[in-house]
């Protein structure tokens, strides 16, 4: 036996095989049911938006990496995944150049000016969303008619609520339709089927890519807040079930609030973050000019993520005080 | 009985379980190299000169006090050389004694020692908890704190290892004798045996040998549950801080591993180790090996050939230290050997943390690994201390899960070293 050349480095010497690529791929897979659901409602336009968003995100990522003289890491799929998440927030009628503009904003302000993934204080998807909503409110609010001849409504549920109050909601949007995304519910691509989003979200949790705490506390905060006001005055405020299933509640809870770089990592930090996102969503939905508040809420609350991370769990042994032997 | 479960940490499972593989004897070497320091106590003073004849079990290195464990000749024969500076497995530079075997394997008759703790020191018995600690030292610390419980650690330090679980099956009588002896030394009444749920059956004979107030606590496979801190928490529900001025016996319990208990029960100087030899292809073998045998001989016995660019690890893949050369001898600070082929070697990465929080979630000490590692990397030691870097037990769970493979353990070890250097400098 010859003396082999041995490699010396610190333990651990094995790795789980987890990688950014793996996490992003899981995220993409988790969103596929939602894409399929939207495809069933809006047809090929859905795929057009999704593909333009993903392709342009990858393109801008590569261009900006070259420009900032970084090594090319588009194969980690982060651009593709964020492109897909971004597409979830768009109506299918959106012109292609707005998508391309949006992904440029997303990649530039959400990643590269800060030095790369992980250094960004804000979720690029939400920066782009807010930028487009302020610049092109018309395009962003151009809700498509579902491919069907029987029209009941042309507004997404939350816009309907904003415009006409909670009176006819139950008739216009039965819970079953809201949940499954059937029967002419319109909205952005990711707001169609709540069942699909739930499946995707659970997939992420089961694969241990996100913690269940943020979505759970988000939805708890949202329904809790909605319940209180609904009990006070059901004529002004919609039911908690409606708020849970309408618009982007589930999309934001599972896919935006859990964005890795911009969400807290400590247990209690996640709880408060989620609760605050949920409450903020309701505040915006109820008392602002915007119909949908979930995305804004996550964007605003993620600004104070560093403070949530200060709520650290007590370190092992921190409660130890007495030196008195424990009698077993 | 329901098996307990550690909070935090990892479930690591391996295809082959070594619990069913009996100990094989590795032939004792013709030349044994015995470093004169094999634990965290001080170096031993050499007791032999060149050309002396030695018998098996003859003391060749004497520890000065209870904080050390003496070292004995593992084979009988002639001392051919005393090396002044020898690099042992742990990287320390220590003197070493080289003994040429005469093939007789003749034991020496050591005089009996009346003080039981001194007897442990003279027999060179060590205990392993992330480091090799002289058992006499550990028990002395426990005795001065009036502990009332003994926790027997029959869990292997990593799930890939199985020597402790196997020892439980093969030498229950020795272990029971050892437990009895320590019960007397410490004057404790209660014994808790923490054991892997799969090795659960083998404990019943020990329990019946010891009689009342012996409790068996099965645990399910979770790494790093075999660390003393975790076991004490599991048994007493008290978390002991990894801080200055507090030590585990402060809760009234002391943890001793089964290998040292079996050594106590054997009532002979320690000249052999019980190890699990594994490789990354699923090969598992439990062996009994004479101290001073080159690792190379052990691997040859097991039919494992390390390849170029691979690693030989002292212990298991999660917490083992990479061994500098296969020619190094087996010592008391070796708890297992794991051979990794080049393909499995994890390349260190230079990437940015994406703050996914997986490391925070897994940390059994509830730290924020990416913070303390980041602070150490940037030289911000005060901040690292504020985030309790000193509480890290260097288990490696954080790094195992990290999607960008930040070498956190390396940064943390570096940071700790800097902090302790600063302290001793100031
Ligand atoms: S920070 Fe230390 S104790 Fe925590 S998981 Fe990492 S190595 Fe283990
Ligand atoms: S696991 Fe790695 S990437 Fe994730 S937070 Fe910890 S150090 Fe950062």
Image (cartoon, grey):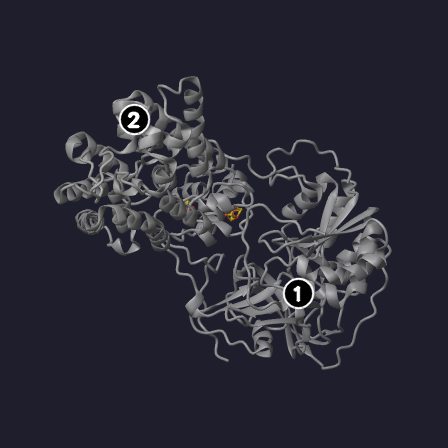
- Residue A302 in which image quadrant: top left
Element assignment for label 1: helix
Q: Nearer the viewer, residue B295 or B172?
A: B172
Q: Chain of mark 1?
A: B
Residue closer to the observer: B119 or B220: B220
* Residue B193 visible, this orientation: yes
Of residues B161 and B121, the one nearer the viewer is B161
- Residue B125 in sight in this render: no
Rendering coords of residue B189 (x, y %): 83, 46
* Image position of A294 (left or right of A241): left
Residue in view at x 22 percent, y 46 percent = A42
- Can you give x and y, in whole percent of width and height, for residue B416 in the image? 50, 44
Kindly indicate the quadrant of the structure image that contains residue A75.
bottom left
What residue sits right under mark 1 in the picture?
A: B163
Q: Position of residue B375 (x, y in %)?
A: 42, 41
Residue holding disc 2:
A161
Residue B152 badge: none
Q: Is residue B345 above or below residue B145?
A: below
- Answer left or right for A284 relative to B199: left
Q: Is residue A100 above or below residue B84?
A: above
User: Between marks 1 and 2, how big is the CA–CA gap?
Assistant: 67 Å
């Amino acid at each position: 036996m010859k003396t082999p050349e041995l490699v010396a480095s610190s333990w651990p010497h094995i790795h789980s095989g987890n990688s950014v690529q793996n996490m992003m791929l899981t995220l993409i897979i988790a969103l596929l049911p939602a894409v399929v659901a939207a495809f069933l409602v809006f047809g090929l336009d859905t795929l057009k938006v999704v593909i333009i968003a993903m392709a342009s995100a990858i393109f801008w990522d590569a261009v900006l990496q070259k420009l900032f003289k970084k090594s090319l890491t588009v194969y980690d799929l982060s651009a593709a995944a964020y492109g897909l998440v971004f597409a979830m927030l768009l109506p299918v009628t959106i012109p292609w150049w707005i998508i391309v503009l949006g992904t440029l904003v997303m990649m530039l302000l959400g990643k590269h000016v800060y030095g790369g993934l992980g250094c960004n204080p804000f979720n690029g998807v939400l920066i782009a969303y807010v930028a487009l909503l302020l610049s092109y409110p018309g395009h962003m609010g151009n809700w498509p008619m579902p491919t069907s001849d029987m029209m009941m409504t042309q507004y997404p549920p939350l816009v309907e609520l904003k415009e006409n109050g909670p009176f006819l909601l139950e008739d216009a949007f039965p819970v079953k339709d809201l949940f499954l995304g059937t029967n002419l519910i319109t909205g952005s691509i990711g707001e169609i089927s709540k069942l699909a989003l739930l499946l995707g979200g659970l997939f992420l949790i089961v694969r241990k890519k996100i913690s269940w705490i943020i979505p759970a506390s988000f939805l708890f905060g949202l329904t809790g807040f909605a319940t209180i006001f609904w009990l006070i005055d059901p004529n002004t405020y919609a039911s908690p079930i409606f708020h849970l299933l309408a618009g982007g509640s589930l999309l934001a809870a599972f896919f935006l609030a859990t964005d890795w770089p911009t969400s807290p990592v400590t247990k209690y930090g996640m709880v408060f973050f989620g609760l605050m996102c949920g409450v903020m969503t309701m505040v915006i939905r109820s008392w602002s000019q915007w119909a949908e508040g979930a995305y804004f809420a996550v964007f605003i609350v993620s600004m104070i993520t560093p403070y949530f991370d200060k709520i650290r769990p007590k370190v092992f042994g921190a409660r130890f005080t007495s030196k008195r032997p424990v009698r077993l | 009985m329901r098996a307990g479960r550690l909070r935090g940490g990892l479930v690591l499972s391996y295809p082959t379980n070594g619990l069913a593989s009996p100990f094989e004897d590795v032939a004792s070497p013709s030349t044994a190299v015995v470093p004169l320091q094999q634990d965290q106590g001080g170096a031993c003073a050499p007791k032999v000169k060149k050309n002396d004849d030695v018998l098996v079990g003859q003391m060749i290195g004497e520890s000065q006090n209870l904080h050390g464990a003496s070292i004995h000749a593992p084979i009988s024969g002639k001392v051919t050389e005393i090396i002044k500076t020898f690099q042992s497995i742990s990287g320390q530079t220590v003197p070493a004694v080289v003994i040429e075997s005469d093939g007789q394997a003749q034991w020496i008759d050591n005089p009996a020692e009346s003080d039981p703790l001194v007897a442990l020191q003279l027999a060179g018995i060590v205990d392993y908890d992330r480091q090799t600690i002289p058992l006499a030292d550990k028990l002395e610390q426990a005795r001065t704190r009036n502990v009332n419980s003994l926790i027997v650690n029959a869990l292997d330090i990593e799930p890939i290892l199985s020597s402790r679980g196997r020892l439980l099956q093969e030498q229950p009588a020795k272990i029971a004798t050892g437990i009895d002896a320590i019960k007397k030394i410490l004057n404790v009444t209660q014994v808790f045996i923490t054991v892997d749920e799969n090795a659960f059956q083998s404990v019943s004979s020990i329990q019946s040998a010891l009689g009342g107030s012996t409790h068996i606590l099965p645990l399910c496979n979770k790494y790093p549950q075999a660390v003393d801190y975790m076991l004490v928490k599991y048994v007493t529900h008290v978390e002991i801080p990894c801080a200055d001025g507090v030590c585990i016996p402060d809760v009234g319990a002391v943890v001793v591993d089964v290998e040292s208990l079996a050594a106590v029960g054997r009532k002979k100087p320690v000249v052999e180790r019980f190890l699990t030899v594994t490789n990354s292809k699923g090969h598992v073998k439990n062996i009994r090996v004479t101290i001073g045998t080159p690792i190379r001989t052990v691997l040859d016995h097991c039919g494992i050939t390390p390849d170029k660019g691979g690693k030989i690890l002292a212990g298991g893949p999660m917490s083992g230290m990479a061994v500098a050369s296969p020619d190094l001898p087996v010592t008391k600070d070796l708890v297992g050997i794991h051979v990794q082929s080049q393909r499995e070697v994890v390349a260190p990465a230079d990437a940015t943390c994406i703050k996914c929080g997986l490391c925070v979630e897994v940390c059994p000490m509830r730290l924020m690994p990416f913070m303390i590692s980041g602070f150490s990397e940037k030289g911000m030691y005060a901040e690292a201390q504020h985030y309790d870097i000193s509480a890290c037990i260097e288990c490696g769970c954080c790094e195992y899960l990290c999607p960008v493979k930040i070498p956190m353990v390396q940064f943390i070890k570096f940071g700790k070293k800097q902090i302790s250097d600063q302290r001793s400098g100031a």
